[in-house]
Amino acid sequence: MDHDIIKYLRDHNPTVRLLRLDNAPLIISFLFQEFKKNNRIVISNTQLITGLSDYLYNLKQSYGEDAYPGTAQNYLDKWSNDGFLRKYYTPNSDEPVFELTPATEKALDWIKDLDKKEFVGTESRLLKIFDILKEIVYKSSDDPDIRLEELERQKQDIEREIEKIQSGNIDRLNETQIKERFFDFHDTARKLLSDFRQIEYNFRELDRSVREKQVNSNLKKGKLLEDIFKVQDLIWDTDQGRSFKAFWEFLMSRHKQDELSELIEAVVNLPEIQKVKQDDFIERIKVNLIDAGDKVNKTNHHLIEQLRKYLDDRTYLENKRIVEIIVGIKSLAIQVKDNPPKNRDFLLLDDRPGIELIMERPLFNVRKNTEIKNIEFEEGYAGSIDTDALYKQLYIDQEELKIKIREMLKFNSQVTLKQITEIYPVEKGLSEIITYLNIASKDKKSFIDDTVIEKITISNKETNKYFEIQVPQVIFCK
C-alpha cells in the first residue's frame, strides 16, 4: 500500500470515485434505501424512476429546486455509465433492470461500518477465532491420534454438559451475549450477500472477455473453445469457485434449508432479539442467499449459452462460405462450357490416390483363450546367485547435502554449487550433482542460472575415476 497505489485507487477505483462525488449523499442514501433497506437485489427501471423521482422531490423541498436539477432517468443512466449501477435486460423483456455493482456494495458497506454501534462485541468474535483456529489445526492434520484426541475432548465436554443439564444447572446466554452474537451474525450475513456481487461480476468479466476473443480472434473453432473452457475451468478451480460450489451444494440441501429456517425462526422469537431487531433482513436471509446464488449460476449458464450461439453462428458462416464457393464454381463452369480448357491436366495430385476396397480388409480372427497349465514348482537353489550387488546400491543422503549447504551459508549470504564442491568434493559421481540440483529446484530461495555454465570436478570412490562436467550455475541463498 504505497503512494502510487493509493494515487491510482483515488483516480480510478469506482468505490473511491463514488465517495468523492458531490452527489455522493444522493447516490449512497437513495441506493441504500431502495436496495439494502428494502432487501432487494434487482429493481426494474420503472420502479427505480418512481422511487428516485419521489426522493428528489422530498430533497428539493428541503434544499431548494436547484439542489438536484437532473431528471430521475438521467441520474440513473449516468450512474450506470459511471459503474455505480449495472443496467441490463432480462430475457423476454424490453424494460431494463438495475442492480448494485461490487464497487457500490463496498461503498455502502464502508458507510454502514462507520455507524456507531451500541457496543463492540469482543467475546463472540474471540470465541469464533478460537473455533476457526481449532478447525484449521485439527481438520488439516493427517495424524489420527490428533484427530481422536480432539474428538475425545469434545466428547468429554458434551458429557459434562449433559451431566450439568441433568442436575438442573443450565448455562444460558445472558442478554448481552445474545445481542453480541446476533449483531455478529447480522454483519456476516450482510457482507456475504455483498460478496455475491463480486462473484457474479467475475463471471460477467469472463463472459465479456470470451466475446471479445470471439470477435477479434481468427483461431479455429476447436482451439478457441479449448481456450474458453480452460478459462472457465480455471474460474471454478480457484479458491473462490470451489468455495461457491461448496456453499451452493450446502444450501441446496433440503435438510439444511429446513434447519436454517427453524434456527432463524427460533432466534427471531427471542425477547432479547425483538428489542434490537430493526428490519426483516434476518427473516429473508435464506431467500436472499438462494436468490444471490441463483444469479451467479444463471450468469455461468448464460456464458454457456453464448458459447452455443457462437458455435451455431460459426457453423452457419462456414456453411455459407462453402455454398458461395460451390456457386462460384458453377458460375465459372457455365462461362466456359462453350469453350472448355484445352489443357487435359485439369487437376494434379502429388501422388497416386490410394484405393482401399472393403473386401480387401481381412476377416475377423477370434482370439484364442490363454491356457494356464497347473505346474508344480520345485524348490530351487540360490547358492549360484551373487547377491552382493543388492548391498552395493548407491545412496545419496539429501539431508547430508543440505547440512553442507547450511554450513557454507553460515559465513556467506549466498554460495554457488561450484564453491560447495570445492570445500566438500563430490564423491558419489553424477548422482550427487543431480541431488544438489533437485534441492535447488525445490528451494524458493535458490535459483539456477542457465545463462552461466560452470565446470565442476567430480569423483567416484567406487571406481576412483575423476570427471569434469559442465552444469548451469546453481546459487543457494540464506
Image (spheres, rainbow, N blue to C red):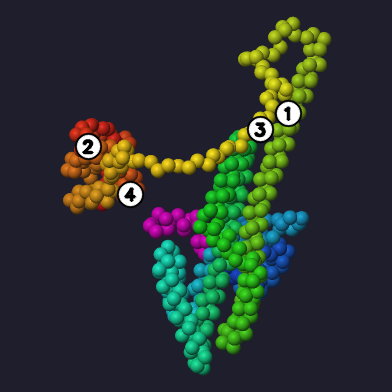
Q: For marks 4 and 1, give the CA distance.
A: 57 Å
Q: Which residue is mark 2?
A: 462
Task: Identify the mark nearer the N-term, 4 or 2.
Answer: 4
Label located before the other in sequence (4 or 3): 3
Residue lying at the far top of the rendered structure: 342
Q: Is residue 13 magenta?
A: yes
Mark 1–mark 3 Cα distance, whole angstroms, equals 45 Å
* Residue 12 included in the magenta stretch of the image: yes
The reply to whether the C-beta atoms of the residues labelled 4 and 1 are less than 8 Å apart is: no
Residue, disc 3: 366
Residue at x 53% of width, y 65% of height: 107
Residue marked by disc 4: 443
Image side of residue 143 versus residue 363, left or right: left
Residue at image point 27% right, 32% down: 470
Please give the residue where the numbered disc 1 appears in the rendered image: 322
Label 2: state its secondary structure.
loop
* Mark 3: secondary structure: loop
Distance between mark 4 and mark 3 Cα atoms? 57 Å
Q: What distance separates the C-alpha of mark 4 from that of mark 2?
A: 30 Å
* Mark 3 crowd level (few <14, some 14–19, many ≥20, 10 Å Cα): few
Residue 256, percent from left and from top: 62, 71
- The residue segment tinted magenta is 1-21
Q: Nearer the viewer, residue 129 or 386?
A: 386
Residue 387 appears at what percent x and percent y?
Answer: 30, 41
